[in-house]
Amino acid sequence: MIHWDAHACLRLHPQADFEPINRLRAAGVHYVSVNVGMDMNPLAQVMSVIAGYTATIAALPERYLLVHSLQDIEVAAASGRIAIGFDLEGAMPLLEQPDMVALYARLGVRQMHLAYNRNNSVAGGCHDDERGLTPLGHRVVAAINAAGILMDCSHTGRRSSLDIMAASSKPVIFSHSNPNALVSHGRNVTDEQIRACAATGGVTCVSGVSMFLGNPEPTVVDVARHAAYVAALVGVAHTGIGLDICFPQAGLDDTPPGQFDPAYWWPAKFIGYERGLSKVSFTPVETWPLLAHALQGTGMTPAEAALVMGGNMLRVAEQTWPASFA
């Protein structure tokens, strides 16, 4: 069975240490989506990160494999490697050009969403005034569908996420979002959003982030509890895992250049943002070897737990990705 982590973050720097990804590999993860940029990161930084990450992956072929097809995940798993795809968090790196989507697909981006917390010209963010998908946003959704990239609604506002799910011709995912019914937070998603995601054939992947799980020191039990809620609401087939572990690296500055204001992107009025992201903690990498048992502890069968841990995301990728991105 394939274990699929739908979102992880390294330092957004071309020289970022990939040892955390190797730890995920050792923990039994077969595929991970690694962030290469957010709305606050300018194009030059995003491209530099993609180039650096791609070079690191190529330099360690015994550990890593950049995914160009679904078969690459199986090849990596069979050879003891971890398959990697990139994701973009927000549409601002597209520079309001839907044609940029296909370019990012050729560079390894396999998943993206349209707004990171705040509104932009494409969609509304979850920490901003409520707004829907714009006309440009509809064009971007069509471009994402055409490129075969996974359409992600994490960090997106409620109304925009519902518009995206109505507009998309492919299954839509939440790569790292938790049920708001369990923990009330602007970044968590409502039952309405979870149901709409499932109606597209998509998957809601729960994260391991402390403030979204409601535990300052989150554990595998918290992750399993949130996954079980989603499964009870819309079915095991629409439940997944995206732990969203952010790995620090001392001495490596990845602060976006220019007038970057953390308080804008992570408003203090939301629980846990009072000191930027300094209070945030994550479930450890070692959550993965414990996850099957924890999910079964919520009443899932071993086969159902396997679907949550990767089978469902594998299905959505099969329905979305082209035969090859090359």
Image: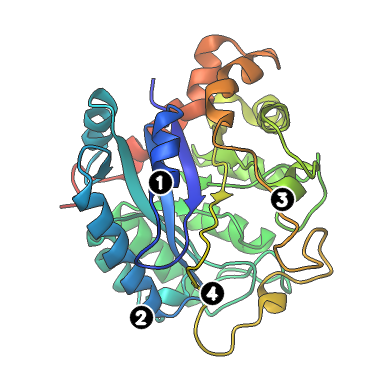
Asked which secondary structure carries label 1, the reply is helix
The residue lying at 27 percent from left, 38 percent from top is 63
Say if 14 sits above or below 215 in the image: below
Q: Number of callouts in the render?
A: 4
Type of the residue with mark 1? Glu
Indicate which disc, 2 or 3, sits on the residue closer to the N terminus: 2
Q: CA distance from mark 4 to mark 1?
A: 40 Å
Question: Mark 2 or mark 3, which is nearer to you?
Answer: 2
Asked which secondary structure carries label 4, the reply is loop
> How far from the left and from the top, in percent, is residue 302?
54, 11
Q: CA distance from mark 4 to mark 3?
A: 22 Å
Say if 165 sits above or below 80 in the image: below
Q: Which residue is mark 1?
A: 19
Q: Which residue is mark 4?
A: 134
Q: Horizontally, is 197 left or right of 323 in the view?
A: right
Q: CA distance from mark 3 to mark 1?
A: 29 Å
> How far from the left and from the top, in percent, is residue 84?
33, 45
Asked which secondary structure carries label 3, the reply is loop
Q: Dot 3, crowdedness within 10 Å: few (<14), some or many (≥20)?
A: many
Question: Mark 2 or mark 4, which is nearer to you?
Answer: 2
